Image: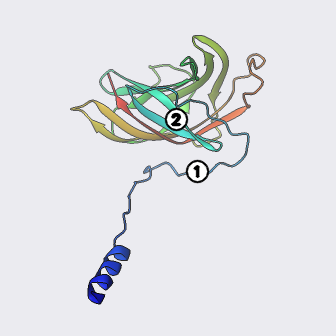
Amino acid sequence: MKYYFSFLVICAFSCSKVENIDPPPCIEKEEIQDSTSKVIGNPFFPNPHGEAFCTKVNQLTWFEPYIGEYEKTFFYLRLIGLDSNKIASDEFVIYNIPLNIGCYKIEANSVDPNTKLVEAYYRNIDYDIIIDEFILDTSAINKISVSAIDTTSKTITGYFAVSFVFKNDRPKRNPFNPYRMRFFNGYFKGKYE
């Protein structure tokens, strides 16, 4: 009996479950640096299109992703944040992402398919009305990583880190929106059409 009990103790302490999650290959994991960082979104909805999230102060933030393919060589990632009434409250878009596994720098603000630069913008919205617009903060490290593409199920997986600043073309309509927003430790997975 003594040997049996010893064997059970050794087995119990020698086994451990370790979950390996590979970090994004080109995007460093970040920590919250201040209390004014803001990322908006809500987990109040079922998500038929896939999943996407990033870090907000003291919480994980969820978006509903829409991924579209165009010209057979590029895709775009459109993340929609919904409020508790399931009304669109935020729109975050990255365009001209090459449809290949790799790491890409997000370099431009406008949405111009002729540039072939990876572009991004963020809008605080109320359904279809733009409340405040933000443009890419070119002084920050802005990247998107495509880590897996499954052509059979038409699924794309990846990571992102992007900063935006208030556009300043008119006064802010929502005074609670900060001047600068950082979306970091972001992850997306969804079907492309």
Is residue 30 visible in the rendered structure shown here? yes
The quadrant in which residue 191 appears is top left
Which residue was labeled with disc 2?
106
| Mark 1 vs 2: CB contact within 8 A | no
In the rendered structure, which disc, 1 or 2, sits on the residue that comes first in sequence? 1
Mark 2 falls on what kind of element? strand
Which residue was labeled with disc 1?
30
Q: Residue furthest top?
A: 129
What's the residue at 36%, 63% (across, down)?
17
Which corner quadrant holds the C terminus? top left
Q: Residue furthest front?
A: 1
Is residue 117 visible in the rendered structure shown here? no
Q: Is residue 7 above or below residue 170?
A: below
Q: How is the image coloured?
A: rainbow
Amino acid tagged 1: Glu
Residue 19 position, x and y percent, is 38, 58
Amino acid tagged 2: Ile
Q: Is residue 129 above or below residue 111?
A: above
Count of residue discs: 2
The quadrant in which residue 90 appears is top right
Q: How busy is the neighbourhood of tag 1: few (under 14 within 10 Å), some, or many (20 plus)?
A: few
Mark 1 falls on what kind of element? loop
Which corner quadrant holds the N terminus? bottom left
Viewer-closest of 192 and 20: 20
Viewer-closest of 104 and 150: 150
The disc placed on residue 145 is: none
What's the residue at 57%, 13% (across, down)?
127
Seen in the image, is 33 located left or right of residue 116?
A: right
